[in-house]
Image (tube, grey):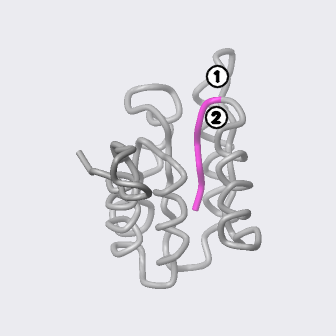
């Protein structure tokens, strides 16, 4: 997996997932993007990182804001079935994707999307620890 995101968000998500899962996941990298970065230079670095994290089963690229430079770079990386991308990265998405990473790229892609979606919930105080999904 590769996280292409603004600033230190990607590395922060990897560190947080390491805390949740008990160890730092292997073959996961983050690429920081800043406002002054040249998108072509970011893309070249992203290609290098895809090669580094790819263990032969494909690479899932997670990015933050659809339409921003990180997602535009991720879009250029997509090779259906080999490199897939999802925007809106959050910690539930990453943890879900890491949990299912041995199941093949298509499954990891779907689990990442569902983890991201299901990880957003309206917390209702009267329900104790239960969450109302919206």
Q: Which residue is mark 2?
A: 42
Q: Is residue 118 above or below residue 104?
A: above
Q: Residue at x 74, y 73 (%)?
A: 22
Residue 41, horizontal then vertical, whole percent? 66, 32
Q: Which residues are magenta?
A: 1-6
Q: Is residue 106 left or right of residue 31?
A: left
* Residue 33, quarter of picture: top right
Provide the secondary structure element on which disc 2 rests. helix
* Residue 72, quarter of picture: top left
Q: Is residue 129 left or right of residue 121?
A: right
Residue 12, horizontal then vertical, whole percent? 71, 45
Q: Which residue is mark 1?
A: 38
Image quarter in which the N terminus is found? bottom right
Classify 10 Å Cα crowding around label 1: few (below 14), some (14-19), many (20 and above): few
Residue 101, horizontal then vertical, whole percent? 51, 76
Residue reaching furthest top?
A: 36
Residue 97, horizontal then vertical, whole percent? 48, 67
Verify CB contact (< 8 Å) between mark 2 and mark 1: yes
Most frequent secondary structure within the magenta stretch: strand
Q: Is residue 123 above or below residue 21?
A: above
Q: Residue at x 64, y 63 (%)?
A: 51
Q: Is residue 79 left or right of residue 35?
A: left
Provide the secondary structure element on which disc 1 rests. loop
């Amino acid at each position: 997996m590769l996280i292409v995101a603004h600033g230190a968000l990607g590395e922060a998500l990897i560190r947080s997932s390491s805390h949740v899962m008990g160890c730092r996941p292997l073959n996961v990298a983050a690429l920081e993007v800043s406002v002054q970065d040249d998108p072509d230079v970011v893309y070249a670095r992203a290609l290098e990182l895809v090669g580094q994290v790819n263990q032969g089963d494909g690479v899932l690229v997670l990015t933050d804001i659809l339409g921003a430079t990180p997602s535009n770079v991720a879009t250029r990386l997509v090779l259906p079935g080999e490199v897939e991308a999802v925007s809106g990265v959050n910690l539930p998405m990453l943890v879900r994707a890491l949990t299912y990473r041995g199941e093949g790229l298509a499954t990891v892609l779907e689990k990442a999307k569902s983890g991201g979606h299901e990880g957003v919930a309206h917390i209702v105080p009267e329900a104790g620890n239960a969450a109302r999904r919206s």
